[in-house]
């Protein structure tokens, strides 16, 4: 079986255990209570979103490098398939991240949303990558679509370190990253399990989505009478 | 702070359901794409 | 092929340039989400009347709950050096208590009191299981609030002792 499918299935198994641990075994936070358990999906979603967009960056670089080297033939298209799939999966987990955050924020911070540096940079990042998907919808010719989306992805990726470091560089409502020093050990386990689980699930989904992108492109080019 | 289990379950439920739905859509579209097409098919 | 190479090189150069700007440009000065009490006082009279955000820690012992005579909750927001009196008629979030971080939106009136229209609680990055109480370490609380010392331990709150 394909590696991405194996990882995806492993991720599902880990996710089931991680959620069970996080919901029923791990203690609740001493101040926040049970609402803190959202951390076991929220933090993994954040991590996964950034990993997906980093894969998009690598795919964009791979495509552009192929252009520069003037490589002809089918070898290049894998980069574009993974660019499309990683951005789509990243946008999905980014959307989940924002919704989970809002659910967590209302009872704790007192508001569903505020334009603090973390939330603002996440919103901008999400919108930029949605824009790349929109761009791909606009450009019909496969070669041009791949090049344009790769270029815009290179720029859009600037948002990712901005998001990560926003809570350290600027005063914000969102707290800074936790470390193993200030997270209870009994909470660290489900957090770590789900962090890998959600990432593995995303990898499995990206593998399927990349395959779909490749099949769609081949069919499209066959219809048009061009080469893949 | 007490309770909020409904909020927790909403967050977990939405996350899990979204992943399941997306997987289902992908598998369905893959099956359609891998089916050999006959002449005259528009998709 | 040459024009494509130039195009690709330009695109990569733009991306690298953008990242370098992010890394080394002084973005921080332009992106202020809230003022600390010290920063609010530094702005002096300019701060009066404008809608601003103030962030800091709720000074222990400063919370005065609304009474029959006055429907306003008052408390003091403090950083390591300065304090500001805050007055609000909003119901605070459940986590509001002494020693916790807050960010309030509102205006400073002529007496220097911050009239708050929105009260948000900022919790730190520590997540701990409940334990029996010890006195909170105020210096450690300042540390976790400003994130200047992320390794400062979040101390248990004596008010939480005995509660799940």
Image: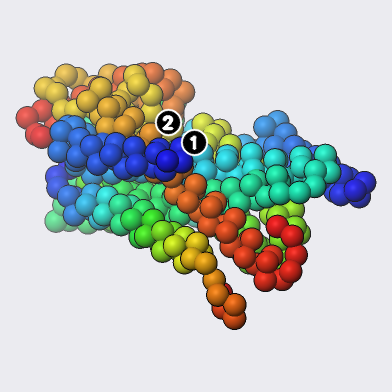
Relative image position of residue C143 (x, y in whole percent): 39, 23
Relative image position of residue A133 (x, y in whole percent): 60, 60
Q: Residue at x 29, y 27 (%)?
A: A188
Q: Nearer the viewer, residue C41 or A218?
A: A218
Q: Secondary structure at mark 2?
A: loop
Q: Secondary structure at mark 1?
A: helix
Dot 1, crowdedness within 10 Å: few (<14), some or many (≥20)? many
* Residue at the disc numbered 2: A177
Numbered disc 1: what chain? A
Labels 2 and 1 touching (C-beta < 8 A): yes
Can residue A211 be seen in the rendering of this structure? Answer: yes
Relative image position of residue A105 (x, y in whole percent): 33, 49
* Residue at the disc numbered 1: A167
Q: Nearer the viewer, residue A23 or A27?
A: A23
| CA distance for labels 2 and 1 | 8 Å
- The colour scheme is rainbow
């Amino acid at each position: 079986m394909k590696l991405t499918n194996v990882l995806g299935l492993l991720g599902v198994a880990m996710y089931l255990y991680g959620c069970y641990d996080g919901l029923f075994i791990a203690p609740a936070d001493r101040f926040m209570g049970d609402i803190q358990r959202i951390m076991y999906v929220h933090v993994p979603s954040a991590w996964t979103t950034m990993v997906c967009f980093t894969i998009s960056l690598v795919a964009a670089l791979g495509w552009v490098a192929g252009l520069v080297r003037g490589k002809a033939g089918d070898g290049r298209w894998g980069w574009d398939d993974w660019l499309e799939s990683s951005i789509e999966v990243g946008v999905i987990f980014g959307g989940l991240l924002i919704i989970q955050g809002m659910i967590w924020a209302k009872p704790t911070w007192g508001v569903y949303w505020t334009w603090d540096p973390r939330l603002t940079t996440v919103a901008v990042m999400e919108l930029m990558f949605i824009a790349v998907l929109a761009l791909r919808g606009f450009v019909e010719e496969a070669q041009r679509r791949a090049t344009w989306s790769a270029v815009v992805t290179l720029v859009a990726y600037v948002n990712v370190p901005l998001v990560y470091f926003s809570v350290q560089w600027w005063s914000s409502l969102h707290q800074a990253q936790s470390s193993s020093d200030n997270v209870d050990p009994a909470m660290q386990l489900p957090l770590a399990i789900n962090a890998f689980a959600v990432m593995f699930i995303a990898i499995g989904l990206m593998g399927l989505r990349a395959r779909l992108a490749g099949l769609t492109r081949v069919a499209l080019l066959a219809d048009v009478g061009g080469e893949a | 702070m007490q309770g909020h289990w409904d909020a927790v379950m909403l967050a977990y439920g939405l996350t899990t359901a979204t992943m399941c739905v997306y997987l289902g859509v992908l598998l369905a579209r893959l099956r359609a794409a891998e089916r050999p097409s006959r002449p005259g098919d528009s998709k | 092929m040459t024009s494509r190479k130039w195009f690709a090189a330009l695109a990569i150069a733009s991306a690298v340039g953008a990242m370098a700007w992010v890394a080394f440009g002084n973005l921080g000065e332009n992106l202020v989400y809230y003022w600390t009490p010290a920063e609010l006082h530094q702005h002096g009279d300019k701060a009066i009347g404008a809608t601003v955000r103030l962030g800091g820690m709720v000074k222990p012992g400063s919370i005065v709950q609304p009474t029959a005579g006055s429907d306003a909750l008052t408390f003091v927001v403090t950083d390591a050096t300065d304090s500001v009196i805050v007055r609000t008629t909003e119901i605070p979030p459940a986590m509001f208590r002494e020693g916790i971080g807050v960010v309030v939106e509102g205006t400073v009136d002529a007496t220097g009191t911050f009239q708050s229209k929105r009260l948000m609680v900022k919790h730190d990055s520590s997540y701990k299981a409940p334990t029996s109480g010890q006195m909170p370490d105020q210096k450690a609380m300042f540390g976790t609030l400003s994130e200047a010392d992320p390794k400062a331990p979040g101390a248990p709150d004596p008010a939480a002792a005995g509660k799940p």
